[in-house]
Structures are given as C-alpha cells and as structure tokens.
Image: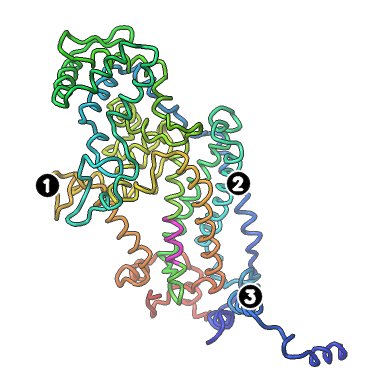
Amino acid sequence: MKSMGATQDEYYRGVRMVPYDLVKELALALAGVGILAIAVAAVLSSPDVAPITVAAWAQSDPVDFETTATNELAGTTTSAGYGNPYNTNGPGQSWGPIAPQKWFGTRIPIDSGNTFVIQPLQRAAFSNPDLGTALDTWQKASSDQQGKWTAAYSKALTTATVKDGKVTVADGDYGPLAMMMPSLLGVAQTGGLDGLLMVSGRFYQTDYTPALLFMGDGTYLAGQAQQWNLLGNQWGMMNETGRYPGQTWLWLYTMWYQVPPFTSSTGFLGINSSNADLGIILLMTLLTIALALVPLIPGLRDIPRWVPIHRLIWRDYYASRKGGART
Amino acid sequence: MEVRAKMEVAKPASEQPAGWTFRVRQAIDRSLPMDHLLPVRQPYYVGSWIYVFGVVTIAALVWVVVSGVVLAFMGPQWWHDSSLGRFFNSLHFWSVQLFFIFMVLHLWGQYFMAGWRHGRAATWAIGVVIFGVSILTAFTGYLSQQNFDSQFIAVNAKDAMNAVGAGAFFNVLNFGQMYGLHIMLLPIGVTIFVVLHIVMVRARGVVKPIDPEGGARP
C-alpha cells in the first residue's frame, strides 16, 4: 500500500506549485474576522430582552394566571395532558408504530396541579390558617366535586374584572378555590411563586422545568412572544427578539412548519399538524444524512459538474487549459 | 560519525526502535508529514477566493471560543449586568453569526467544486457532522442566554425534543444541563471534528479542478 505522502506527491504531479503561506493566511483571517466581529458587536450590541417572571405574568395578566392555575387543577392544560416525559396523561406524538416519546417513560415527572398549585400553596399556608383549611377541603373532596369547582371558577374567570391587581369573579359555588386562587395570585404577584416553583429540597438549583412548563401553559408568554415574531407560525424558531439575526441556519427546519402536510389536520401518509414535530425531525435527519452522503448519490453529486460555477471558481485554471497550457 | 554508526550496529536487536510508540510515530510520519500538514507550496489554482471561506470559518471559531471562555469565566450575571459583559456577549453572538455565514459559504463552495472527489468523501461527511454539531452547540447557547429568547425557545423546542424521545435525556428546560453542554462537551466536539477535518484536508491536499471529461464521483 502506498503511503499518503507518496499519494499526494503523485496526485499533484505535473501541477504547477506556487509559494503559499498558510500560517500568514490564518493570522490575517484571525485579525480580519476579529476586527469585523468587534466592530459589529460594538455598534449593534446583541439581543437581551429580560426574561419574564411568574410575578410579572401574575401582575400583568392576573386573569390568565388564575385561569391557567385553575386549569392545572382541572388537568386541562398542555403540561397536565402532555404525556411523556412528564406524565402518562397524553399519548404523545407518534407515526404509526414509531412512538419514541413513549419509549423512555416518564423520566421528568411533573404532576401539574400538585407541582404548580397545591405544593406552593401548602408552603404558603403556614401563616394563613384559612388557606390551610381551604387546601384541606380541596384534597378531601371527590374528583367529581373538584371538577365542578374548577369548571365553575374557570367559567367565572371569563367575565372576571381586575382592580388593583386583584381578580373579582361573580358570586358562585367555587368551594375552596375562592380562597386558593386569590392566595396563589397574591403569592405569585409578590414573587414568591418564582421561588416556590424552584423548591427541590436542595440549596442549589439550575433546573427551570416546572416554572417554564407552568408559564408555557398560560397565554401571557406566547402573547409576548407573538409581539417579537417568535411563534412557530411566524418562523419563530429562527427569529430573535429585536432586529437581530437568530438561528438563521434553522431556516429549512423552520420552513417545514409553515407548509403542508405539517400544517394540515388531515395530513399525508399519517403525518399532520398533530405529529409535525416528529415528522419534521425525521425528515431533517434524513436530509442531513443525505447531505453527508452527497458524494455517493448520483445526480446530486453530478450537479456541480453540470452547473458551471466551478468555472468561475477556477477560472484561471480553465483559461490556461483553453490556452493550451498544461497543468 | 563512523564511531556512532558502529555503535548503532553494535546494539542488540532488543534495543532497536520498535514498539507501539514507534509504530504510531511511523504512521504519523507516513500519513501526515510536516510537508503536508504545513506546506509552503500549493497548486496555483488555490489562489481562488473560494478557499478563503474555510480559513475565515476557523478564524471565526477561534473568536467564538475566546469570547466564550471569557463569558464562562466571568459567569452568567456578568453578561447581563455590566457593559463589558454585554460587549463580550455581543462579541460571542456576532462571532457565532460570522462562523455560520462563513461555514455555509464554505459548504456551498465545496459543493460546487465537488470537493469530495478523488478520495475526499469522508472529509465532506465530517464537514457535515461539524455543521450538525455546531447547530446543536448554538442551540444550547441560545438556551443558555438567560433572557426572554431562552425562555421561549425552551418552551417551544421541548415539543420537538420530546416527540423524538430525546427530551427524556436532553431537557431544554434545564438551564444547568444546557449550559454545561454548551460550554464544555459540545465545543469539545466541534473542535475535535474541526481538527479532524483539517487533518484530512491537509493529508490529501486540496482537490483538483473538475475535469470536464471526468465525473464528480468520490
């Protein structure tokens, strides 16, 4: 077997070689790119819109906050009925027998009603006996009774009024919710719920899963995102707040979310809007593998020969060939 | 000199260069001699502007890493609360943007040059792997910014990750996990693949221009 060194020497046999300073080229590139990056960074800065807190949500849209919390108890929010990896309350996405969302089980267990509402209220109830009684009533009630209270309170919230940050609903039979929901709102508005959702029994904490899932269940976060053109149907995955480029390299991935069958409820071959994430990631995985294998795919690998861009790239080479000079 | 030569000859067979170290050294000498790793002469057609995109991609990556190391050293609060921190955050952000712009231009350039010809298919494939790992690295970076973008990207991206089962292990809502991956494992991955890519390019040399009579096969 010939060595690689001999192979390269043979490969370039007859080709005119000229002096070339790779290290100098790299040094100049480092300097040039550095100057460009520093200049753009200094002039244009970068996006850094402050994150939304649960407190800000509860202060800005208390009705949405209480509606979300009530729906958590009713089990009707996105996270409550999500399925794996958070719980088993939903089927998750699948395509025929391909159901990877189920394969690894409930690895990040979240009981939405308990995690986002009951447990924070239990911690807040130590100085409020009335709240403790209300929680006791809630937990001793049948699920049927709980359902009636949440349904009544959710309905009342649709016509609720807000004054000084407090939500007022029409009189009705809301059971302990009449105490629990305003209490949760009060804790949230003071910033207490931001901390309570992070309680894990350990001092240090870097996992924001409960707080983000809870905020994602409401409409406030998505409403803010819509103003920044970040929603999925606004090509949001490749956008960024402000007039900054985002992850523009995700343009193809983002594009699939805008077109059928991924936007269609009927879909094609079992792929539709309800399993679009699964379908699009499978498609992108196939396309990425195809990109890596382009050298082996007839047609795709021949396009560069058919499209004369290489004649522009190596115009000196082809000009010298035309002139009869041999390389 | 004669004396030394005689001494070499006089060595017993057990002292002759041998063993794994010697074989590895021989293999490196064979496959990547210094003449190929850092050549001082190149084919004349390498003067084309297209070859610049590869080196400026590497340069941008260096700036990404340098600005990232400063950010990692100073910690998350710094890049929000101080003007110098915000500047380094911006430098990191724009270095990443430049890195991707140059990398995509390099990719398209190599495509239209059919850069995989004459035994270079693996070099092309490793380049695609770099592109993929870079996207994952940038994605975890967006999740680690600790601003509104991070929040909303996390809340939305979880569905795609969960749908393919990855969310069970790769929790985009977990800042600690995303930050660790972003500043440690994934940059190491990108760097290793980039080094491998460069070594492969240097070992074989740049590909010849497309021969009108030839094909574009590997």
Numbered tag placed on residue B66 in the rendering: 2
Instruction: Say whether marks 3 and 2 touch (CB < 8 Å).
Output: no
Mark 2: which amino acid? Val
Q: Report which residue position mark 1 lands on.
A: A266
Q: Indicate which disc, 3 or 2, sits on the residue closer to the N terminus.
A: 3
Q: Are marks 3 and 2 on the same chain?
A: yes
Checking the image for residue B33, the label placed there is 3
The spot of residue A35 in percent (x, y) is 60, 44
Q: Nearer the viewer, residue B180 or A9?
A: B180
Frontmost residue, B110 versus A133: A133
Count of number-bearing discs: 3
Amino acid type, label 1: Thr
Kind of element beneath mark 1: loop
Q: What secondary structure is the magenta-colored segment mainly?
A: helix
Quarter where residue A290 is shown: bottom left
Tell me how far mark 1 sits from mark 2, CA to CA.
49 Å
Q: Which residues are magenta?
A: B124-132
Element marked by disc 3? loop
Q: Local crowd at mark 3 within 10 Å, few (<14), some, or many (≥20)? A: some
Chain of the residue under label 2:
B
Question: Does the rendering let one see residue A232?
Answer: yes
Q: Secondary structure at mark 2?
A: helix
Position of residue B102 measured from the top left corner of the image (x, y, whole percent): 48, 53
Query: What residue is drawn where x is 39% and y is 16%?
Result: A126
At a point 57% along the width and 31% down the height, the residue shown is B78
Q: Is residue A7 above or below residue A184?
A: below
Q: Separation of disc 1 and disc 3 at Cα?
A: 60 Å
